[in-house]
Image (spheres, grey):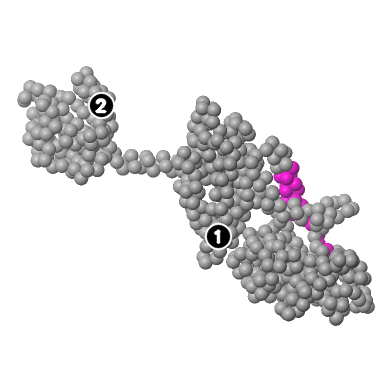
Amino acid sequence: MLNPFPDFYNKGLYNSILNNISEGIIIVDDNSRIIEINKACEDITGYSFEEVAYKHPKVFSSGNLNKTIYHDLRKQLRKSGFWKGELLNRHKDGNVYPLIIKIHKFFNEKTKKQNYFAIFTDISSQKESNTNLLHLAYHDSLTTLPNKLKLEAQLEYVLNNSKRNDLQFAILFLDLDDFKVINDTLGHASGDEVLISFAKKFKSIIRTNDMIARVGGDEFIVVLSDISNYLFIERVCEKILTLVNKPFEIDNTSFNLGVSIGVAIYPNDADEVKTLIHNADSAMYHAKYKGKNHFEFFSSEMTQNLDYKTKKEEKLKNAIKKDEFIIHFHPEIDLQTNEVFSLEVLARWDKGNTKLLMPDNFIPDLDDSNQIIEFEKLILKKACVQLKNWHDNGIYNGIISVNISGKHLEHGDLYGSIKAALRISNLEAKYLELEFRESDVMKISTKTLFTLNTLSLLGIGLSIDNFGKGFSSFNYLRECSISKIKIDKSYIDSLLDEKSDEVIIKSIIDLGINMGLSVIAEGIEFPEQDEIIKKNLCTKVQGYFYAKPMDNIEFENWYKSFKQLKY
């Protein structure tokens, strides 16, 4: 072994140091032949000294050495006798690895010639760590989709490219409809499963030069580059809707989700990124307000409409918070027994003036917004507390019927809402009935069927309002444990016309009787309607002809004299 160091170095000490450091060392003679390597070099390269002795150092090379780097290496060694840089070498097993290397030129006193020694470190793990850190910095950790930082960089590139080449591009703002319900009812782990699944599917429907990024909990942005026409954007939106609308299962329960999509296009809708995203967001909210689960292209009117709707939703939210909604009670009467067997709960909005707002003036807005579920929780609590008070004081011992929206049924934790109202009021479940629109029951899912049947087992009564308009819902009457149907008011109104729907009404009454259901004729306001209903053997009724909706004090006074009345 050649000792290139001064004589005062002990050879044993020299070898000990050489073979116990973690960096690889290679010593080369004046003819560029390897004359010594240490143990770390053998470990890093896979070669023993015997395999590389007196060979050129290129034996370690990957073959990918940049000519410019090689030229710089030789130039610096001639000039200063030192070079430091990053190279790619190939392990004996064929794997390529990166390394940091320092090469020194020194004069060998024994041979009186120039020699070289290199000290190098394998930085594969560091490179891998840096790559992982870079990926984490620019990608969402849950879905592995690009995140906001990556999106911003991509949008800057797409914007500049579009400006230079006079191209169009589109931003699609996606928001999964009512996704919060999955997190609230099944837990965040299930919600994460849904997001991961959707992310994988989203990637399959966009081009390689496009991007989809996750920018929020259930919010995504798609960037479509080089758009030539609107038809292409529509096709992409339709693919996304089809993808999201496919039923999926969590814990053996089938779910349906929707997605609202807003579209903004450069340069038509804005010429800078921030405004484009804002406009796509506005279009997305417009899609939500129009019923969700579809796409909308941005228009300048949307911003004004969104501001108006946002303010309206804020007013409704504050009204719930300030407890501005009060409840009235509309009796349902059994003509055979002359008893009030149920009270339908109807809300009124007390805005502080003398006139109360009727449901038609605020329920549609609540249903369009995200406040309908919180509103119904409030009404449930008020109604159960009031009924329990009447029970305790011997005033009224019947049941109450509370209207529930399709949104609460399909996307809310309805079972949890009911349990909370019963717990607060200490009311028995058998005294509470829930009333649903027939149109909402018709589009019922496996999850909703489970909820309704669980509520029925709890003792809650289930009723369908506006019955008779959607005949396909007949299939659900038994599956959903329905106990009561209310004939759609439009049929009752027709009884005053020459071409009445009496035949349909009789069919509904017969259907209900044959299925063991309680049938209610609602909306009766005139004696003629009352007579026809009685003629067709419907004995349970509701309407202004018998009693109007009343607040709790009015009902108590009316109910005292009710037993003396005969309908």
Q: Which label was assigned to residue 213?
A: none
Magenta stretch bounds: 307-331
Residue in the foreground of this view, choosing between 13 and 505: 505
Residue at x-position 26% and y-position 35%: 88
Residue in the foreground of this view, choosing between 493 and 430: 493
Marks 2, 1: nearer the viewer: 1
Q: Residue 387: percent from the left, percent from the top? A: 78, 70
Q: Which SS class for mark 1?
A: loop
| Count of marks, rendered view | 2
Q: Residue 198: percent from the left, percent from the top? A: 51, 52
Q: Which label was assigned to residue 247?
A: 1
Residue at x-position 73% and y-position 80%: 514
Residue at x-position 64% and y-position 41%: 297
Pointer 2 residue: 67
In the rendered structure, the answer to whether residue 74 lies left or right of residue 529 reads: left
Q: Amino acid at mark 2?
A: Lys
| Magenta residues, dominant SS class | helix
Q: Image quadrant of residue 285?
A: top right
Q: Residue 110: percent from the left, percent from the top? A: 6, 25
How much space separates mark 2 and mark 1, taking CA atoms? 57 Å
